[in-house]
Image (cartoon, rainbow, N blue to C red):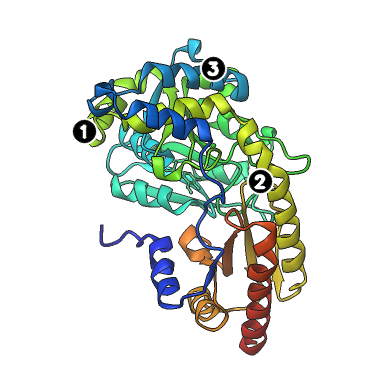
Amino acid sequence: MDTIQAPIIAVIGDVIRQHPGTISLGQGVVHYGPPQAALDAARAALPQPETHEYQDGAGIPQLLAAIDAKLRRDNGIDRRNGLRVMVTAGGNMAFVHAILAITQPGDEVILPVPFYFNHEMAIQMADCTAVLVPTDERYQLNPDAIRRAITPRTRAIVTVTPNNPTGAVFPEEALREVNDLCARHGLFHISDEVYEYFTYGSARHASPGAFDGAHEHTISLFSLSKAYGFAGWRIGYMAYPERLHDAIAKVQDTVLVCPPVLSQIAAVAAMEAGPAYCRQYLQSFAEVRDIVLSELRALEPLCTVPPADGAFYCFLRVNARADPMAIAERLIREHRVAIVPGDAFGATDGCYFRIAYGALQKATVAEGIGRLVTGLREILTGWK
Ligand SMILES: Cc1ncc(COP(=O)(O)O)c(C=O)c1O
């Protein structure tokens, strides 16, 4: 555990707390809460004795049925292909379940860089090695580099699309190449799709689990945290090949016993509201994103911002040799705005920052981004 990085959001959170009035572009959260129907369902379930008892480990039947229908409708993933579904306490737990189920100590898991930090942390906690493979200058997958990183100890390749921390959306062809590589080399493709509904412009989300033959080796991870403003309710789920079920059921029973019942009841109602619930906010996300990207592009050539067509992040590259943590601290102390240093995401070949705009609304974006642009310009000009 000593060799594993400390959760960066908590580290930055501590500095923010010492500097009241800081606008956080740090944490990946949305600015809205759950659908009213979810809250009503939870309230109605409170007096029921079953709400307070252990329930089935994989999830309550109503939620599993809602997930089945959603996987078919939105992802093209058909559970009748011999897949199993497990409800977890969020997407992070689903990833840990997957890693514990498929690896032995010493195994390798391939992570394109920048990665989602909890993925690297989970791999290391399982006493495995995260093998880091660079993406291109637009943070897109490089299937050739991934192929070259495969060794006899490789167990899985992870993709996150739409991506945290970069906002990149991986095209279907690249995901197919990765999924085929997994099929050919006997690996699992772990596909994290917690931002599946958050795409802008012409970008489209593709689910690798829907590709022909993919059900044999694809583990697909989803979450209600972002789409339904549900982060505190801790509900996610995973679809995986039947042959992993015994292992995953053991992990689930040991760690969680069963997903929180009240949260599951609320989740059924949220999923009835469906993706239309988050789509009503997507237009305003798109507008905020446009403002963020165009303001940041004004920092060129000091910084570069590659396209970010999904999720609610962009990943800024500073074109100078500078210490990202020192800059992040100065931005909070001197300019009251927080962003996350890129090394937390494995981007150590330069100075990078993740900017999260999901918590901003159009009314607050100007202030937050204004402070960031002013702060970066001042700090970086002094740095050179
Ligand atoms: C890529 C990715 N996967 C998984 C998660 C975990 O979400 P949760 O555990 O709340 O479902 C997040 C949260 O930020 C994420 O960005």
Residue 193's image quarter? top right
Q: Which residue, given by chain and number where applicable, does mark 1 sit on? A: 254
The local crowd at label 3, few if under 14, some if 14 to 19, many if 20 or more residues have their Cα within 10 Å, is some
Residue appearing at x 63%, y 69% in the figure = 368
- Labelled disc at residue 205: none
Q: Position of residue 150 (x, y in %)?
A: 48, 41
- Find residue 317 and report its image quarter: bottom right
Residue type at tag 1:
Thr
The answer to whether the residue bearing label 2 lies less than 8 angstroms from the nearest atom of ligand 1 is: no
Spatial separation of the CA atoms under disc 1 and disc 3: 28 Å
Give the residue pinned by disc 3: 69
Identity of the residue drawn at 26% across and 22% down: 50
The residue sitting at the bottom extreme is 382
Callout 3 amino acid = Ala
Tell me which label, 3 or 2, sits earlier in the chain: 3
The residue that label 2 is drawn on is: 310
